[in-house]
Each structure stands twice: as structure tokens, then as C-alpha cells.
Amino acid sequence: MAGKAKQLIDSIIAQRSKGNPSVAKVVKAKFILKGINPDDFGATSADDPAVIGQLQALAKELGVTV
Amino acid sequence: MKTAYSIKTTPEEVSKDIQSQLGPSEPKAVVFFASCAFAPEAISREMQSAFPGVSVFGCTTAGEIISGKMLKRSVVAMAFDDKSLEQISLSLIEDITSKTAVEDALGVFEKQYGCAMMDFDQEAYVGLILVDGLCKCEEKLIDRIGDLTNVLFIGGSAGDDLQFKQTYVFANGKAYPNAALLALLKPRAGFKTIKTQSFKVLDQQLVATRVNEANREVLEFNGKNAAAAYAESVGVAVEDAPKHFISNPVGLLVDGEPYVRSPQQIKADGMVFYCNMKEKMRLSILETTDIVSDTRDVISATKARMGNIGAIINFNCILRTLELEDKGLADAYGNLFTDIPTIGFSTYGEQCVGHVNQTATMLVLKACA
């Protein structure tokens, strides 16, 4: 399987920003400051269970459901 | 908004001096930044006494900023009137190590406004944060705030005139160590926030491969001893690396914009920073540029976007202040704010989305019609 990390990242950013580009930019910065760079993940990135777990925890911190 | 400063020598004289400059009308709130030359408890008490019934808050500094000047051993203050500010609320975190510190602090705003933090309009509200500058936990604090709200909180870490013994935040006429103060503002005429740092991003990159996050230590970059890898990237011997700490910090890039992490010292073979780093973080070596011209440009651009600027609160890193002083540019920096009601201070860290170093974060309030 591949691309799940990108799906999760996109979903978290979309839910938090509700389409507001300024908020989306801040959420992306928060990802990077938390140690996950969204630009490192694409549709073909392998699904690393550690990264997926990290993103699920991050979603919880940000109060969104994935 | 009115600003004032005092270089009188006692808290009593200072508070009277500032009261007379900010009067006679009663402000809605007063924010002040004070040198540790004044006993923290006394200056907080006297400033609150000078403005009874008013929200008076602030912190200690490593140098103060007022329109046109960078000061030492002074107190600077800004009064918000009803015309400039629709609402302001304060929430004090008395123990920043408490696990529920941020939730409890934001809960105060939720209760006061009857609105969940996630539902506040981030275009209408902005937050200020003043935090103990020696706590080493600003990262957790600002990160958790950003988890719980889309309202942007910006601010700075309190200083103590480079003594590195104890810093304080001021509220309720008291001085609190190990604390943070959050202020939620609803300006009437709008606002912008600025995060500015004066660096060129170089090609050399370092990946933090072993860290002690709690102590803000990087033990290894690129799988090598951190100090050796940093020195190699900067192109100097390890023993000469500290001479490059101010001119060549590292930056975590977000869409090309650096979130600066400044080295503090080499410890064993690792490096201690003024900001934490997580494993696998990819950092770029930065090279200092012109703080005065970069800041002038960002203020001009902000003015062009907003129309008239009514006031600025400037949280300017102490390392920037030291660099400006070293280059004889402190007056030139102060002069950038001559025509704008401005207060600020030299900080031990800056906050904007995250905790950063060698940066100025500013709240810019639009002038009221």
C-alpha cells in the first residue's frame, strides 16, 4: 500500500483549515515543527506504520478525526 | 494607542511617570515591559496601582524598545483605549509545567466569551503570549495552543538583562516566575502579525539524527557528532564554530521561510540550541543579512497592505539586539519605529506558530479611522 500518509496529511489540513488558505499554511508549519514535513509524502510514498501512527496521534492532538 | 517610557530609578517614580504620560483618560488595558533593574514584584504592584481596575500586564526584559529608541534599564508601556480595542481578556498560567496548563488557560477565554477556542474567528481575534524565558518549555506551550485554536498567538520569552537567573511575567499587580500570560485581543480596526528574520538560506543541510529534545541538545547531525557536522557545513574547524553561531544558525524551512534555531554552545561533541529539535528534522545553514534593511522592508510592506499602522508590539530576539549593538546599528533599528507608536523588548525567544530564535515577532494594529 502507498499514499496513506499523504491522504492523512491532506485530510488533517483540510479539516483544520476549512478551506482558509492562511490557516492551511499555519497547519502545514505546525506539521513541520512537529517533525513531519508534508512535502516529503506523495501518492506513491510507502506506508510506514510508524509515520501513520505519528499522523494519527497528530490528528488527535489537533482535534480532527481521520 | 498611547506609548510611554520611563528611565526614572524607582518603581514608584516610574509608574507615576508613565501614568502621567498615558493619562488622563482611563485605558482599557496597559501592557508594559520592564528591565530587571527594577524589583519585579514592586514594579508590577506600582504599575497596577497606577491604573486601578485596568488589565495591566507585561514581563521582564533584556532591553526595551519604544518608538525611535532601544533602551536599557527602563520601563516601556502601551495603553489600549476603547477606540482601539473592542475586547481584551487575560489568562495567567501560574505553573507552565502543569500538564493541563494550556487547556486551563484557554478555558478561561472560553468561559468569558461563551465560545469554544476552535470557534473564535482568527481574522477578528489575536493572542499575545509572554512566557518565562528560562523555562525551556516554550515549544510545548505554543504547540499546544496551536493545537487547540486557530487564533494566532505571538509573543516573546521574558528576559532578565542577560543575567540568566530568573524572569517574570506581570499580572494582577504581581510578578510570576515559571509562568506565562496569555492575552486575547479583539482590535477594532484590524491587525497583522509579522515574523521576520534576517537570513539567507544556504545550500548546506543538516539532518538531526540523534537528539535530546528536552535539553534542546542535538547529539548527531547527518549521523556524525553534531559539532563536527555543523563545523564542516559552515566550513570551519570545530574550535572556531562558536564564532559562527550568531551569523550562521540553522533554519527549519517552511515553504522556504526559516524557523530559526540558534546554537548556544558545544557540549561534549554535541550542540545545545536555544530551541529544541526533533529527530529527522532537516535544517539548512543560514547566513545573516541586514536586520535594519530587512525590517524596514517588512514594515513598509505591512504598511502598504494595511494602510495606516496604529501601533506595533515588537518581540525582538536578544541575539538580534546583540548583533545590532555589535554592528553599531541599534539606533538605526530603533529609528525604524520613530513614526509608529511602538513598544517591545529584547526577548529570550520568540513565538509565532512555534518557538523560534533570532527572529522578531510583531503584532501590528491598524490605525483607527
Image (cartoon, coloured by chain):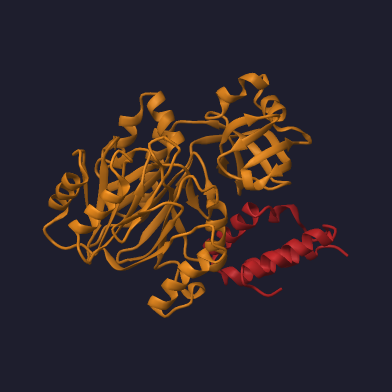
Residue B145 in view (yes/no): yes
The part of the image, by quadrant, that contains residue B97 is: bottom right
In the rendered image, residue B133, in percent from the top left (x then y), is placed at 46, 46
Q: Number of marks in the image?
A: 0
What shade has chain A been given?
red
> Residue at left 40%, top 29%?
B324
Nearest the viewer among B355 and B36 is B36
Q: Quadrant of the C terminus of chain B?
A: bottom left
In this picture, is B318 found above or below B147?
A: above
> Residue at left 79%, top 36%?
B223
State left or right for residue B332 relative to residue B7.
Answer: right
In the rendered image, residue B346, in percent from the top left (x then y), is placed at 39, 40
Q: Quadrant of the N terminus of chain B?
A: bottom left
Q: Looking at the image, which residue sits at the far bottom?
A: B114
> Residue at left 63%, top 48%?
B214
State left or right for residue B41 relative to residue B297.
Answer: left
Residue B341 in view (yes/no): no
State left or right for residue B46 relative to residue A18.
Answer: left
The part of the image, by quadrant, that contains residue A64 is: bottom right
In the rendered image, residue B225, in percent from the top left (x then y), is placed at 74, 31
> Residue at left 61%, top 19%?
B240
Which of the chains is orange? B
In this picture, is B267 found above or below B65?
A: above
Q: Looking at the image, which residue sits at the far right?
A: A1
In this picture, is B145 found above or below B38?
A: below
In the rendered image, residue B38, in percent from the top left (x then y), is placed at 28, 42
